[in-house]
Image (tube, rainbow, N blue to C red):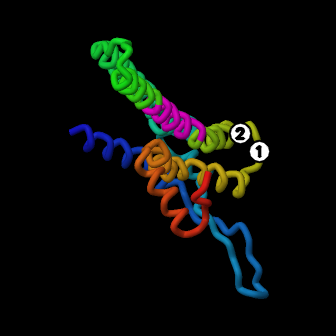
Amino acid sequence: MFFVLIWVVSLVLAVPLLITSDLNTIYEDSSCDISLRICHEQNEIWQTMMISKRTYTLSVLATQYAFPLFSLVFAYTRIAHRMKLRFANRNIPFSSSLSQNQRRKSVVDRQRRTHLLLMCVVAVFAIAWLPLNVFHMVNTFEWVSLFSVSTFAICHVAAMCSACLNPLIYAFFNHNFRTEFIRLFEKLGLRSTTR
């Protein structure tokens, strides 16, 4: 049911853009028949809508950035707290036994890597999506009067990179993946086998 709600909210948030957007020619060279067109919101159409562009932008900011960021921080904080409790309940005592101390160190290292992984996922989301949301706020509230296609493109690409970076983050923190990746580079002769 939760997934249905997410899809419904996503569709509802997309409808105003569908209605208010149109293709704009931003560059045209008739001598070589080249033109560059982008899909862009039309402010004239926004003025006829039941919802204002400012309200819409704030709604998108809340549902696309603030709520997911809060959810990530909340969920990952809970996960980290439960891991800490589970580790404390194991109560692996320090001892003179080398294997006990190695096991304890292994658990602590694994817990530290997991905490770092969770923090990286949150940080990447926050950093990657912030420029696009700031751009929309600046544009909507007319803090800067000129819409920059290149700035929008850079902000949009940064936000989309968030989804691409997550698998890389998970892979980076996975010891087996790193080991196999290094082994692949060694086989290809791209990394020295001596250290």
Residue type, numbered disc 2: Glu
Horizontally, residue 184 falls left or right of residue 145, namely: left
* 116 drawn magenta: yes
**Residue 55 seen anywhere in this rendered image of the structure:** no
In this view of the protein, which residue sits in the foreground, 156 or 149?
156
Quote the CA–CA distance across marks 1 and 2: 5 Å
In this view of the protein, which residue sits in the foreground, 192 or 118?
192
Residue under pointer 2 = 142
Quadrant showing the N terminus: top left
Q: Residue at x 52, y 47 (%)?
A: 162
Label number found at residue 145: 1
**Residue 174 seen anywhere in this rendered image of the structure:** yes
Q: Residue at x 32, y 15 (%)?
A: 92
Q: How many marks?
A: 2
* 59 drawn magenta: no
Residue type, numbered disc 1: Ser
Q: Residue furthest left?
A: 1
Label 1 CA crowd tier, 10 Å (few <14, some 14–19, many 20+): few
In the rendered image, residue 190, in percent from the top left (x then y), is placed at: 61, 65
Q: Residue at x 62, y 51 (%)?
A: 195
Q: Are marks 1 and 2 in contact (CB under 8 Å)?
A: yes
In this view of the protein, which residue sits in the foreground, 73 or 166?
166
Q: Residue at x 25, y 37 (%)?
A: 2
- Boundaries of the magenta span: 113-127
Examine the rendered structure and indicate whether residue 142 appears above or below residue 190.
above
